[in-house]
Image (spheres, rainbow, N blue to C red):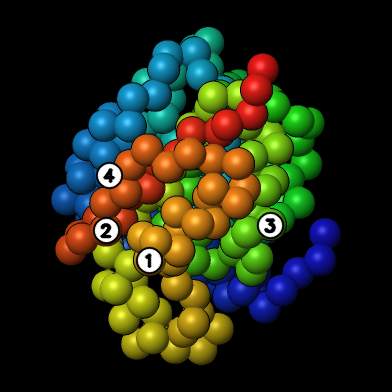
Amino acid sequence: MSHDPHQAFFDALAAEWDLQFTAEDLERLSHIVNRIKIEPGSDILDLGCGTGVLFDMLRRIIGPEGTVTGVDFSLQMARVAHRNFPFSNVNVVDADAMALPFRDSCFDMAISFAAFPHFADKQLALDEIDRVLKPGARFCIIHLASSKELSDLHHRIGGLIQDDELPPKARMQEMLEASNFEVIQVEDHSGLYLVCAVNKKID
């Protein structure tokens, strides 16, 4: 697959990526994951999975009958995730959200945690997510910061990610609707960005 400069940027961060998440962050994240009502036995797509921060939380919910498939365009992130979670129901794929290597309508849910701003073509990524989700399946975007807080952080960091932003509420809703989703929840306030939408495909 082709590589953009962001991939090398995140490759360099892979070894210490988990250190940025405090125990409080993980507790809050676990609470949010529990709020979005994942069904036991579900096949979950984790887009921009990084080192697998969500994997344990998801595995506890879906149980042995479900699966977690992590996708990351950083090969080093994907390698760490694969090494950290050598379970039969966890798969990790080095791939781009704009060209997902999966058949149509194969996942019960998709989640993107701390990754959506870095997708080079967000609308194309949403089209791909729509394609691989089953009819009526949900897609959720989660960040432990508001869109403004995240934008400010990326501007401070600068370099490749200085312009990587979360779409504000109205724009995000437009983009999701353009990719065949119905928005069911939007929260964008201090300490949280949470968007959940339902795929409108007909079975």
Q: CA distance from mark 1 to mark 3?
A: 18 Å
Q: Amino acid at mark 4?
A: Leu
Judged by depth in the image, the label closer to the viewer, 4 or 1, is: 1
Judged by depth in the image, the label closer to the viewer, 4 or 2, is: 2
Q: For the residue carrying disc 2, how many other residues have a C-alpha within 10 Å: few (<14), some (14-19), or many (20+)?
A: some
Q: Amino acid at mark 3?
A: Leu
Residue 120: give x, y in percent of width and height. 64, 68
Q: Is residue 28 left or right of residue 100?
A: left
Question: Pointer 2 and pointer 1: residues touching (CB < 8 Å)?
Answer: yes
Q: Quadrant of residue 59?
A: top left
Above/below status of 120 relative to 86: below
Which residue shows up at 54% across the image and 48% down it? Answer: 177
**Quarter of the picture holding the C terminus:** top right
Quick check: can you spot residue 142?
yes
Q: Earlier in the sequence, mark 4 or mark 1?
A: 4
Q: For the residue carrying disc 3, how many other residues have a C-alpha within 10 Å: few (<14), some (14-19), or many (20+)?
A: some
Which residue shows up at 50% across the image and 57% down it? Answer: 174
Most extreme residue toward the right, as rendered?
A: 1
Q: Which mark is residue 168?
A: 1
Quick check: can you spot residue 23?
no
The residue tagged 2 is: 188
The residue tagged 3 is: 124
Q: Amino acid at mark 2?
A: Asp
Residue 172: give x, y in percent of width and height. 45, 58
The residue tagged 4 is: 29
Q: Earlier in the sequence, mark 4 or mark 2?
A: 4
Q: CA distance from mark 3 to mark 2?
A: 23 Å
